[in-house]
Every structure is written in structure tokens, then in C-alpha cells.
Amino acid sequence: MEGRLNHLKGHLIVSCQALPHEPLHSSFIMGRMALAAAEGGAFGIRANTPEDIAEIRKNVDLPVIGIIKQDYEDSCVYITPTMKEIDELMEVKPEIIAIDATESIRPGGITLDDFYAAIRKKYPEQLLMADCSTVEEALHADRLGFDFLGTTLVGYTKQSKGDKIETNDFEIIRTILNKAKHPVIAEGNINTPEKARRVIELGCYSVVVGSIITRPQLITKSFTEEIAKLEKLG
């Protein structure tokens, strides 16, 4: 965790992603989005697909957390779910690769433990981030030896349904920080500068912020929905 990765400590990582159904879906646009994030002071980028990562690197010299979102019929796991996606990401060698580290079974009936062991055997030097949805999952990933623990999936899985990362002054994050040995990267619904500052104050290594910066359709929707409340009152 030396050199470029120390660069991330105590700072903001911006997630620059747009899926095929979204209006900004384009590697070119993600490259420019990353450039805008860098000009705003971001210290790292989280990106989806080798194509986007390659384009982002043409625009900025920042550490990248790489993922591939891929759906499989036999599993609900979609963030870097199989070795196929790992191999594709290793073609562009992001500084960190993030994978779903929840209790859910991976495609083909593979457990997290077996998948993690296979990655470490094939790519022993690659840094890995665990995208988790519960305290228990984060602590299990910590025991396995993930280099970073992320709260990315809190509230997005059946085992974390209804949970909110900011509840009780980020209680989930504080619990993980108190019990885990590896660095924690806060991610998921951190949608104000104040929340981002708070998780760093609590001791998180870094904080990832995405939609509130890089998805204008969702930002616009938050404004229009608030204005629409006037119609209900009227």
C-alpha cells in the first residue's frame, strides 16, 4: 500500500460510471468525467470496464479502483463476479480491483472464500477491495485478507435491506473500523460533502462518492422531486 496508494489516504475517490442504459454511457465521457473530478480535487477514480479505465488513464494520472458489472442468470452477484472479469481487468491493471464480497453465492455456485483464494493464487500481487453489505461480511473479508474493506453494498442486498450507511452517525462504519485490521473505504449513499468529511474523521482510509457527482439524471431528479412536493401541498 505504498506510493500511489498512500495518495488515497484521507481523500476523495470519485466513481465515474455509466451503464449501457444511462445517457452518459461512453468511455470518452467517463474519461472527461474523471478529468473533471481530478480538477475538482479527487485523488482517485472508481471505474467500470477495461475500456473506461483505459480512457480514464488517458485523461488523468490517478489510482483506479476497477470493476466490471456483469449479470449472470444463476447469481445475484454482479460486481466483478467471476475470474473472467478479473482476467479482463488485469489487462489494464487497475491499482485495486473491487469485487462483491457479500455472503451471496457467485455464478457457478462458487463461494467467496474459494473465489478469493483463486484470485490470490493467479494474481498474488493484485490489491483487492471487498464490496460488502453488512458488518459480518466486512469482518469476514478482513479475515480472508482483502486489502481494503468497502461498505459499497449496504442496503442493496437481501441481508442488508433497509439498512442505511449514515444511520446513527455511520454506526456500521464505526463498528467495522473498531473490529477490522484492514483499511476501510466508505462508499454508498454518501451524498453530501459533510458526510464525506465525517467518514474520514471517523477513520476511514478514503471515501468513494459517485452518483451525486457523476450521474446528472439522478441529481436532476432530486431537484424535480423536491419541487413536485409543492404540487402535493397545493
Image: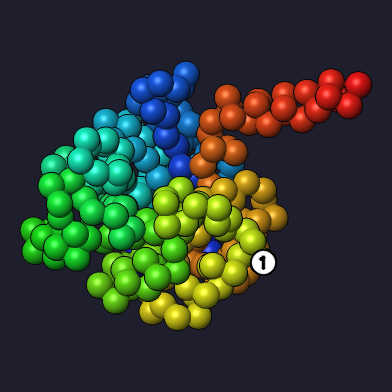
Q: Nearer the viewer, residue 134 or 99?
A: 134
Image position, residue 218 (x, y; %): 59, 29
Q: In the rendered image of this protein, does residue 1 appear above or below residue 67? A: below
Task: Identify which residue is drawn at 26% across, 72% down.
Answer: 145
- Colouring scheme applied when the structure was drawn: rainbow
Mark 1, other Cα within 10 Å: few <14 / some 14–19 / many ≥20: few
Give the quadrant of the N terminus. bottom left
Which residue is identified by label 1? Answer: 168
Task: Identify which residue is drawn at 29% across, 46% down.
Answer: 77
Image position, residue 27 (x, y; %): 35, 26
- As helix, strand or loop, the secondary structure at mark 1 comes to helix
Image position, residue 5 (x, y; %): 37, 61
Q: In the rendered image of this protein, does residue 34 appear above or below residue 104? A: above
Is residue 139 visible in this depiction of the protein? yes
Looking at the image, residue 120 sits to the left or right of residue 29; the answer is: left
Task: Identify the image quadrant of residue 143.
Answer: bottom left
Specify the amino acid type for callout 1: Asn
Task: Identify which residue is drawn at 14% across, 63% down.
Answer: 114
Check the image and name the residue furthest to the left. 122
Task: Identify the image quadrant of residue 171.
Answer: bottom right
Task: Identify which residue is drawn at 31% across, 60% down.
Answer: 103
Q: Nearer the viewer, residue 82 or 194?
A: 82
